[in-house]
Image (cartoon, coloured by chain):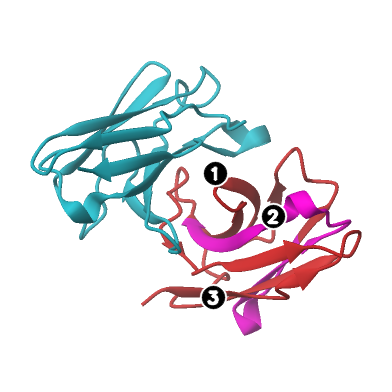
């Protein structure tokens, strides 16, 4: 059974760098077609796609945030890490990781973690 | 402002049907049959309800259906039940530069 769980600090200060970890089970990022994505949701607002890493270590980023984001994976630990630099209060959100697959086309985000709320405040 | 436009709210009585629209552009909804819909209850993670415009994942009630015409996708829920009350988000693939865009979400109230 597929599960994902996000972890990281609940509170960061403005200008700091946020590091979030997604630990998953039930699939492997060394399997062709497997990918993990990060998506965030500010309180009371809509979902926003942030980044994706695939089985081949290819990385894709939101155009508006790409200068601040880095996504990486540790296949042996079943983990994906997202870092976001220069945090601002507008980055306050629940951050989700989700599984997505590629097989002659993109699948939907079929499994999601429970999310982790990150507040940016001094 | 979200890339895809959804009504902020819709409502219906138990047993009725409702439809939620999701309007994009020729660069996203209009170009790809990769529209998905997610249900989100308060404080919970989104749950996949519809993918590839009209396909239902295993375990999702057949009361949920999806369609698309041009740049607008739609989610229809028939036989409304109290448990359907939630926020609904559409999502579309938008090509290899933008990747994925979401709608602003629609709050469904079951009266």
Residue B80 placement, left or right of A81: left
Residue A67 image position (x, y, % from top left): 85, 47
Of residues A53 and A90, the one drawn nearer to the viewer in this rendering: A90
Above or below: residue A122 compared with residue B72: below
Q: CA distance from mark 3 to mark 1?
A: 21 Å
Q: Which residue is mark 1?
A: A46
Q: CA distance from mark 2 to mark 3?
A: 22 Å
Tell me the quadrant of the picture where the N terminus of chain A can be found: bottom left
Q: CA distance from mark 2 to mark 1?
A: 26 Å
Report which colour depicts chain B.
Answer: cyan
Report which colour depicts chain A.
Answer: red
- Give the quadrant of residue B33: top left
Q: Nearer the viewer, mark 3 or mark 1?
A: 1
Q: Which residue is mark 2?
A: A58
Residue A69 image position (x, y, % from top left): 79, 54
Above or below: residue B27 compared with residue A98: above
Residue B2 placement, left or right of B75: right
Q: Which residue is mark 3?
A: A5
């Amino acid at each position: 059974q597929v599960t994902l769980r996000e972890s990281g600090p609940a509170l960061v200060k403005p200008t700091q760098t946020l590091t979030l970890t997604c630990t998953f089970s039930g699939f492997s990022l060394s399997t062709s077609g497997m990918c993990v994505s990060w998506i965030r949701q500010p309180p009371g607002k809509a979902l926003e796609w942030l980044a994706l890493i695939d089985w081949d270590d290819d990385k894709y980023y939101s155009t508006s945030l790409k200068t601040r984001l880095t996504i990486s994976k540790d296949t042996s630990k079943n983990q994906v890490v997202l870092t976001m630099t220069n945090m601002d209060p507008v980055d306050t959100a629940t951050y989700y990781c989700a599984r997505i697959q590629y097989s002659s086309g993109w699948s939907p985000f079929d499994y999601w973690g429970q999310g982790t709320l990150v507040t940016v405040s001094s | 402002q979200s890339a895809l436009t959804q009504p902020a709210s819709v409502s219906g009585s138990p047993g009725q049907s409702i439809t939620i629209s999701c309007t994009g552009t020729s660069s996203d909804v209009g170009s790809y049959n990769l529209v998905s819909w997610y249900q989100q209850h308060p404080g919970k993670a989104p749950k996949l309800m519809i993918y590839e415009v009209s396909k239902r994942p295993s375990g999702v009630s057949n009361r949920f259906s999806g369609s698309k015409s041009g740049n607008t996708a739609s989610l229809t829920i028939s036989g409304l039940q109290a448990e359907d009350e939630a926020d609904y988000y559409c999502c579309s693939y938008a090509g290899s530069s933008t990747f994925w865009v979401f709608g602003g979400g629609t709050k469904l109230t079951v009266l």
